[in-house]
Image (tube, rainbow, N blue to C red):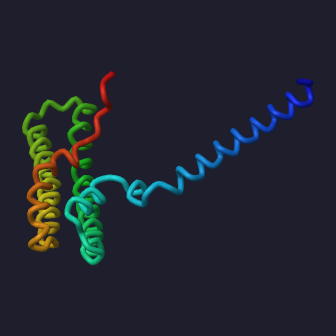
């Protein structure tokens, strides 16, 4: 085999491998289901409860309310935490003030949990009688579904 044939085959091979790579990248981006774009509890809940299109629309409205309320409550929580940690910078030894800050943090966190709980009560109201069995199963997974993702240890 002479150099020209070898280089031609090498160029064709490289071209084909590049085209396959480009096809893979393009295909893998467009092949992802829409739920991967907004991956997380939303689509898991829709799938597990077998929601209809109208239920999904109502559920999306519940999600908007839920996110809005949680964001407000988390803002309140952060204000409480900042207030607490400012005491460190001021070298304040006022135990009543610290206790007040901890109580405010606990109240803010409690409010967040109440918002979550109400959200799932509202989701239950969306379910029809056939979906209630799936909802019961879902309630066993709710805490895990919303738990922070921890990196796996090697």
Q: Quarter of the image for the C terminus: give it.
A: top left
Give the quarter of the image for residue 127: bottom left
- Residue occupying image coordinates x 80% and y 31%: 10
Where residue 150 sits: x, y (%)? 28, 34
- Residue occupying image coordinates x 15% and y 47%: 143
Q: Residue furthest front?
A: 1
Where residue 75 sits: x, y (%)? 27, 54
- Residue occupying image coordinates x 12% and y 61%: 135
Task: Decide which of 75, 143 is in the foreground and name it.
Answer: 143
Q: Residue furthest bottom?
A: 54
- Residue occupying image coordinates x 18% and y 32%: 92
- On screen, residue 102 versus residue 65, left or right, reads left
Where residue 28 sits: x, y (%)? 53, 50
Say above or below: 82 vs 31: above
Give the quarter of the image for residue 49: bottom left
Say above or below: 22 vs 33: above
- On screen, residue 86 versus residue 14, left or right, reads left
Task: Decide which of 152, 16 is in the foreground and name it.
Answer: 16
């Amino acid at each position: 085999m002479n150099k020209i044939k070898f280089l031609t085959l090498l160029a064709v091979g490289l071209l084909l491998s590049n085209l396959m790579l480009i096809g893979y990248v393009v295909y893998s981006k467009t092949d992802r289901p829409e739920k991967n774009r907004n991956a997380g509890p939303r689509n898991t809940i829709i799938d597990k409860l077998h929601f209809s299109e109208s239920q999904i629309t109502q559920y999306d409205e519940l999600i908007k309310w839920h996110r809005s309320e949680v964001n407000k409550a988390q803002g309140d929580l952060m204000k409480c935490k900042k207030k607490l940690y400012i005491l460190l910078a001021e070298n304040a030894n006022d135990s009543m003030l610290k206790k007040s800050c901890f109580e405010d943090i606990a109240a803010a966190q409690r409010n967040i949990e109440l918002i979550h709980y109400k959200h799932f009560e509202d989701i239950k109201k969306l379910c029809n009688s056939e979906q209630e069995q799936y909802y019961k199963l879902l309630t066993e997974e709710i805490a895990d579904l919303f738990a922070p993702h921890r990196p796996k240890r090697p």
